[in-house]
Amino acid sequence: MLGFSFMATLLITLFFLVNNYNTEISTIHKSMLETFDTKQAALASSLWNLDSEMTLVQLEGIIRSPSINLAEILIGDKSVYRAGEAPESQVLMKEFPLTHQIEGGSVYPMGTLRLKTGLNHVVSHILNNLWSTLIWQLFEKGLMVLVVYILLSKVVVSKIKHFSDYFETLDEHSLHHPLDLKTPPGSKKNELDLVAEKVNTMRENLLDSFEARIAAQQKLQENSQVIHRQMVQLESQNAELERFTYTVSHDLKSPLITIQGFAQYLFDDMRNNNLERAELDLVKIKGAVEKMNHLLKDLLELSRVGKVVSELQEFEMKIPLQEALELLEISLKTEKVKINITDMNHLVVADKLRIREVWQNLIENALKYRLKDRELKLEIGSCIVSGKTAFYIKDNGIGIEKEYLDKIFGLFEKLNKDTQGTGIGLALVKRIIYLHGGQLWAESPGSGQGSTFFFTLN
């Protein structure tokens, strides 16, 4: 009878201890949830408005609750605001996502509210009651009390220890591992096991939230980079369009003025029956018309670049280079040009016809600006510049002064006004390379020391 009474008393005591523990844990969870529901809007608003002082005031108000020892706000994995002191052991922690809704219904994640409280007083209270019961029963049934204590330790304390160890070591890495109370397979689940399941469910939801936020941040960063590139391209195109408009209006005006002037001379000479002078006037007018025709043809070709583009294909760079050399074979032989070609087997993906035009214009440019008293030598090859393959053509021609290195790629820009052509060749090269996502630049030691033109393709 005494044994039964002792067991009954012990079981009832154990039941109330476990129930009290679960009640206190539930009360703490409820308090944390109510605190979050109360403070969420104000915290999200202060974070949205970057009001650090108000954020800290809100956190200080949270830790006034007797069930919360530490309140902190995390952005990513970094704690940016903090109030209170974290318990050294037996820690219960909950995290709540903070969101802010703006006009229009859009919701933005602002961070995570982490609340911590110590369970020492809970465990201490339970153990005190346990020890009181055991000491009281020890006078009658010491051995039975010891057995019950051992059983109690296995059922409750060990699981509480698992809880404690789990939350003490919880971080962004251990969050991927579920809470395991080491419950034997087939055993009936108790309240602690259910709490563990809820913790694991919360852990999975938290992981999903983290992954979704990281994905959103990456997408936002990618969109920002795309917008930035498009803005840079738009600014460059606007600047090019402005230069194009100015240059066209300026350079087309010159032959028109010539035609207008000599047309008046022709009218006067015809009226005076001066046929010899009239014939000279017509020659001048014809020359101005031919110049305008060349300008218009070159401008048309420039405008077609980027609109009429062949399908991109993979090929070795030496192929369009060889085609360009064949087109210019007569001029190169006539001028007795010596050409040295090295390392041009690189594979590229581009519009082969346009790349051939690039090489043709660069070689023609070298022919135009050679030194009359020096045999023209060309070196064509490739090299590595800033980690990218760059192709180049180097000559021993008239060279370029430093202040003209960028200017030569403009429309109708010519270093020597006496050379043939309209000065649009390098502008055409620049546009083709630009449409291929590459870069084009020139280097030269100075006048009379030759020059080197480089370009890359993306």
Image (tube, rainbow, N blue to C red):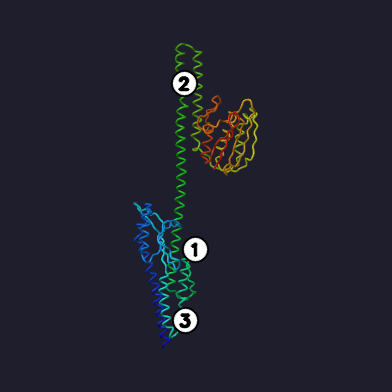
- Identify the residue under disc 1: 174
Residue 153 sits above or below residue 299 on the image: below
Q: Amino acid at mark 1?
A: Ser
Closer to viewer: mark 1 or mark 3: 3
Q: Nearer the viewer, residue 437 or 256?
A: 437
> Which comes sooner in the sequence, label 2 or label 3?
3
- Identify the residue under disc 2: 259
Q: Amino acid at mark 2?
A: Ile
Question: Residue visible at 45% across and 34% down?
Answer: 241
Residue furthest bottom as drawn: 1
Q: Nearer the viewer, residue 425 or 276?
A: 425
Instruction: Estimate the spatial distance between the alpha carbons at disc 1 and disc 2, rounded to whole Å.
Output: 84 Å
Question: Residue visible at 46% across and 55% down?
Answer: 214
Q: Quadrant of the C terminus?
A: top right
Mark 1 nearby-residue class (10 Å; few <14, some 14–19, many ≥20): few
Instruction: Estimate the spatial distance between the alpha carbons at disc 2 and disc 3, rounded to whole Å.
Output: 120 Å
Residue 77 sits above or below residue 30 on the image: above
Q: Quadrant of residue 121?
A: bottom left
- Identify the residue under disc 3: 146
Mark 2 nearby-residue class (10 Å; few <14, some 14–19, many ≥20): many
Secondary structure under the numbered disc 1 in the rendered image: helix
Q: Quadrant of the N terminus?
A: bottom left
